[in-house]
Image: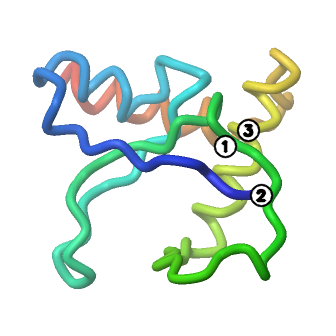
Amino acid sequence: MIVDTIYGSDQYDEHMRKRISIYDFTNAFYLPADPLFSFDEGFARLDHVQPVSEQHLTGHRGFKLAPEALDALQEWLMTFLTNTKPADSMIEDYRRWAIEADAT
């Protein structure tokens, strides 16, 4: 799976960035900033996902996700593609935690 484009969150206001970060949109997967890797906050557009053979990725920088983040990305992609969430959704657990944390 290849995510066609990673979008920077700087093109959105604070309210929209917050909505993206708590997975309010099934077509966007949040990618937090990581100063260690010089990566600014952004998101992957799941509606731009397409299969691509690795041999066609000449010059691709790529990026690596932690195992938990890769699991979350796979879950969110399936949620987007099928319009269903697993009963034990880690994204929904995270959403509940983030919304509660924001309310305090």
In the rendered view, does 102 fall on the left or right side of 81? Answer: left
Residue found at x 82% / y 35%: 78
User: Is the Cβ of the residue at disc 3 closer than 8 Å to that at disc 1?
Assistant: no
Upstream in sequence: badge 1 or badge 2? 2
Q: Is residue 26 above or below residue 93?
A: above
68, 54: nearer the viewer: 54
Mark seen at residue 1: 2
Residue on which disc 1 sits: 90
Q: Nearer the viewer, mark 1 or mark 2?
A: 2
In the rendered view, does 97 fall on the left or right side of 103? Answer: right
Upstream in sequence: badge 3 or badge 1? 3
Disc 1 marks which amino acid?
A: Met
Residue 79: image quadrant is top right
Q: The C terminus appears in which quarter of the rendering? A: top left
Disc 3 marks which amino acid?
A: Leu
In the rendered view, does 5 fall on the left or right side of 83? Answer: left
Mark seen at residue 77: 3
Residue 20 image point, x, y percent: 37, 28
Residue 59 image point, x, y percent: 51, 82
Residue found at x 77% / y 57%: 1
Residue 26 image point, x, y percent: 61, 22
Residue found at x 21% / y 59%: 40
